[in-house]
Image (cartoon, rainbow, N blue to C red):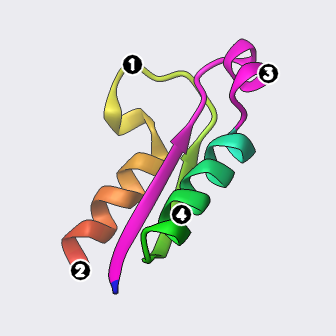
């Protein structure tokens, strides 16, 4: 079985209304389920940040990639 780390993000309250973190997560989970992909990590960010190092969820994902 293939495994995946998944990442969801909204950068503004306006985005959260139209495509919430939960909606993104539901879609990703459905895709993974239908393609026999096991989710081994789930990361998210909810704030706006122009620099990647200011996105703690994304930084955590990258850190975990180094340990796989």
Q: Mark 3 points at which residue?
A: 17
Q: Do the residues labelled 4 and 2 touch (CB within 8 Å)?
A: no
44 lies above or below 15: below
Q: Which of marks 2 and 3 is nearer the N terminus?
A: 3
The residue positioned farthest toward the front in the image shown: 34
- What label does residue 50 carry, if any? 1
Quadrant, the N terminus: bottom left
Q: Which mark is residue 68?
A: 2
Q: How crowded is mark 1: few (under 14 residues within 10 Å), some or many (20 or more)?
A: few
Tag 4–tag 3 contact (CB < 8 Å): no
User: Contact, CB < 8 Å: mark 4 with mark 1?
Assistant: no
Task: Looking at the image, tell me whether mark 2 or mark 1 is earlier in sequence order.
Answer: 1
The residues bearing labels 2 and 3 have C-alpha atoms spaced at a distance of 34 Å
Q: Give whichever of discs 1 and 3 has the lower sequence position.
A: 3
Per the model, the C-alpha gap separating discs 2 and 1 is: 27 Å
Q: Decide: is 22 above or below 29.
A: above
Q: Which region shows up in magenta? A: 2-20
Instruction: Give the distance between the C-alpha atoms of the residues marked 1 and 3, in whole angstroms.
Output: 20 Å
Which residue bears the numbered disc 4? 42
Which residue occupies the foreground of this view, 13 or 63?
13
Left or right? Give the position of 22 relative to 66: right
On the rendered structure, is 10 left or right of 49?
A: right
**How many C-alpha atoms fall within 10 Å of the one at disc 3: few (<14), some, or many (≥20)?**
few
Between circles 1 and 3, the one closer to the viewer is 3
SS at circle 2: loop
Instruction: Report the Cα–Cα distance between label 4 and label 1.
Output: 21 Å
């Amino acid at each position: 079985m293939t495994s995946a780390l998944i990442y969801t993000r909204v950068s503004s309250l306006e985005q959260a209304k139209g495509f919430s973190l939960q909606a993104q997560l539901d879609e990703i989970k459905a895709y993974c389920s239908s393609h026999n992909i096991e989710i081994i990590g789930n990361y998210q960010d909810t704030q706006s940040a122009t620099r990647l190092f200011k996105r703690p969820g994304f930084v955590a994902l990258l850190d975990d990639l180094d340990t796989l």
